[in-house]
Image (cartoon, rainbow, N blue to C red):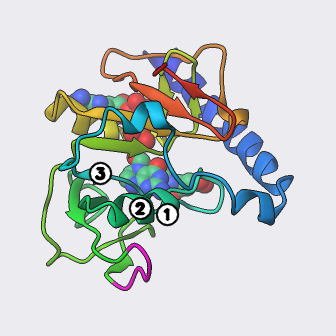
Amino acid sequence: MKASVISKTTLRKNLRKMRREHVAAQPDAIRALLFHRPPAPLLAKIGDDAVIGLYSANADEAPAGGYAKFFHERGHAIALPAFTDQRATMTFREHTDPFGEGDLEAGPFDIAQPRPDAREVLPDVLFVPLIGFTASGERLGQGGGHYDRWLAEHPGRIAIGLAWDAQLCDALPTEPHDIALDAVITPTRMYGIS
Ligand SMILES: Nc1nc2c(c(=O)[nH]1)N(C=O)[C@@H](CNc1ccc(C(=O)N[C@@H](CCC(=O)O)C(=O)O)cc1)CN2
Ligand SMILES: Nc1ncnc2c1ncn2[C@@H]1O[C@H](COP(=O)(O)OP(=O)(O)OP(=O)(O)O)[C@@H](O)[C@H]1O
């Protein structure tokens, strides 16, 4: 247990650095073209009424705003993680303005989130950020356990990672509570759904 916690911490540090360098080496004009719409094989699995969970990406994470606009235009409800404080359970609230983002405020992790009066919703399809992933869908996140806990409490959802290719790992330390992703999408590949 302890060894895996230590190696997760070291891995996070190394992977964050790799991610930062990967993104810094990428021309802004190229980045602006990526992650605009999900690959067709994934889209085929998403029902018309599905609530779509996304996230407010930081500068190094795979951007999720393009998918928010895409699914919003197709009539889906969009949801983003929301927290009342850093120790609170992660919930999802509706994000009604993916084009203007006027419905968001800074949350306790300094990540933009819907305001407390936004409708609480349960995503059917959850796109998740990550620090590292394997081809079989194992995920290393920020270490808060937020997504593992949420997915454990809400079984039967589709969970899809969004990542840069540089975040692919041969193997990751796994713990019993880790829940594998159904697929991971990068700018060049989709792992997991054929
Ligand atoms: N964009 C985004 N939103 C997200 C997550 C995420 O990883 N990325 N989360 C994933 O669970 C949840 C929030 N949980 C979080 C847990 C820990 C830290 C954290 O430790 N952040 C570091 C800085 C990270 C960095 O340098 O990139 C910190 O505050 O020191 C952030 C968010 C839900 N929303
Ligand atoms: N299903 C669960 N039930 C209870 N505690 C959990 C569960 N999943 C994760 N945790 C707790 O969260 C801690 C962090 O988990 P982990 O290192 O896997 O986070 P992560 O998936 O990288 O982070 P995040 O999902 O926030 O990006 C674990 O040590 C554990 O204590």
Q: Mark 2 and 3 residues: CB-CB less than 8 Å, in contact?
A: yes
Residue at the spot of label 1: 65
Name which residue type carries label 1: Gly
Image location of residue 155, percent across then percent down: 17, 28
Measure the alpha-carbon separation of dots 2 and 1: 5 Å
The reply to whether discs 2 and 1 touch (Cβ–Cβ < 8 Å) is yes
Report how far apart the C-alphas of labels 3 and 1 lie in the structure: 12 Å
49 to the left or right of 63: left
Sequence-first tag of 3 and 1: 3
Question: What's the magenta region?
Answer: 98-102
Residues packed near mark 3 inside 10 Å, few (<14), some (14 to 19) or many (20 plus)? many
Secondary element under disc 2, as helix, strand or loop, is helix
Report the residue at 23% width, 61% height from top. Answer: 77
Q: Amino acid at mark 2?
A: Ala
Q: Nearer the viewer, residue 102 or 105?
A: 102
Q: Residues within 10 Å of mark 1 (few under 14, many from 20)?
A: some
Q: Mark 2 — residue?
A: 68
The residue carrying mark 3 is 52
Q: Quadrant of residue 88?
A: bottom left
Q: Is mark 1 within 8 Å of ligand 1?
A: no
The residue under label 3 is which amino acid type? Ile
